[in-house]
Image: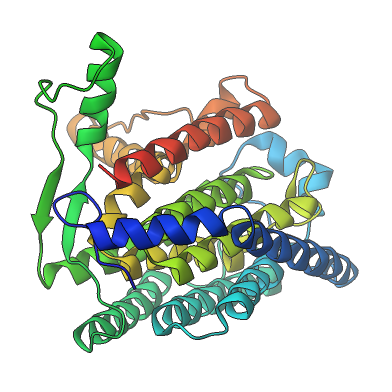
Amino acid sequence: HALAPLGGRWGAPAAASAKAATAVALFATPLQWFAVAFFLSAIASGGLARLLREAKAFQPIRAEGPAKHSASRTKTKTPTAGGVALVPAGCLAALIFTRAADPATNAVVVCTLLFLAIGFKDDLGKLRAKNNDAGLSPRVKLAAQVLVASAFVGVVAALSSADVAPVSTTVTFGFGVVGALWEHFLTGQVTGLSGITSLAVSMGRLYYALAAFAVVSESNAVNVADGLDGLAASLCAIAFVALGVVCLAGGRAELGCFAIAMGGASAGFLVVNRHPASMFMGDSGSLALGGALGAVAAAAGGWAVFPLFVITLVFVAEVLSVIFQVGWFKWTKKRTGEGKRLFRMAPLHHHLELGGWGEVKVVSILVAFGAICAVVGVAVAGG
């Protein structure tokens, strides 16, 4: 593997080898990774949708959600747990192309499948009870996520210590890219006079706590965002491809392969999940996809964590909208005796829906913003 980034930029050996590999791969291999995963996911998802529809495994609609969702015959008769098709499709494609030869990527695959198992257990409970509030309790679900994430980062740390898959524990904030772009916008050249520079923070073993947090937080963030047809799948497709590019440029080609394959699988799932959806991914899909995003960045190293959160900024905004909504309601109720809301409804996509935007418009706007975040995230990775 190439060297981890130094001082906010990739080391010279890393840059040389990564550029040589990427020059060949970007026009061939990554497209193959994406395409194979896309078709595996599309075929598996289509078949699973038919089976689940015959079994009447329909998604219970959340009572607290928008009224038009509960009233929609389309949504109330839509099968769920589509992650059972899409997630293994992406993992299989990645294992085929990496030949299961990279221990770190194999660990990411296992972590992803364990998050899939947590989500499937939750989906199964909801389907059996025909109640969206059934399934795993929030505490049990979070405990399971933390347990899997902790075990995963333990493996990453062990692989790094054994020099099998070295991980940089220096977290790099690529603000220098912003400074350079600002200077170029104002003067037409990069002068270094803006004062906006990159920041590198050496975290040592604390990095692994941050890595576990990234895995769990991304898992829950994607889960929160999965509330409109095609939203989570589209954003994941974009985010995985962007993260794959970051990994390729940083010299971690196997992790890049996994990420791009998962992006292809997410895009393939849109065959059944685009509006009007004929199947939802359920917690099986959302928990696993989010966990996979965090796991890739965690296994890559500190240089990938900040770009991850930039790339997935829409997911971050979605989960923060829920946190702020609940916090503001509790605080105002304690102060005034009456709880008040910051948003019409949380998460953010429902707030926009209740503001008069149609479902397709909300998804289109958020996906467009997600694409912008992905480009910025890739840019700051080299900052």
| Viewer-nearest residue: 123 or 117 | 117
Which residue does the image show at 44% across and 45% down from the upper left? 315
Residue 110 location, x and y as percent? 48, 82
- Residue 167 in the image, given as x and y percentages of width and height: 24, 72
19 to the left or right of 80: left
Task: Identify whether 45 is placed above or below 101.
Answer: above
Front residue (pair 337, 239): 239
Please tell me how many numbered marks the rendered image carries: 0
Q: Position of residue 337 (x, y in %)?
A: 25, 33
Q: How is the image coloured?
A: rainbow
Between 337 and 147, the residue placed more toward the observer is: 147
Residue at 39% x, 79% y: name it. 104
Name above or below for residue 130 compared with residue 358: below
| Whole-percent x, y for residue 109 in the image | 50, 78
Splitting the image into 4 quarters, where does residue 340 fall? Answer: top left
Q: Quadrant of residue 86?
A: bottom right
Tell me if 68 is positioned left or right of 328 in this view.
right
Q: Is residue 283 above or below residue 66?
A: below
Residue 223 seen in the figure: no
Q: Could you tell whether 339 is left or right of 169 in the image? A: right
Write the residue at 12% across / 73% down. Answer: 205
Q: Residue furthest top?
A: 186
Q: Quadrant of residue 162?
A: bottom left
Instruction: Decide which of 126, 295 is in the foreground and name it.
Output: 295
Q: Quadrant of the N terminus?
A: bottom left
Residue sitting at the far bottom: 162
Quarter of the picture containing the C terminus is: top left
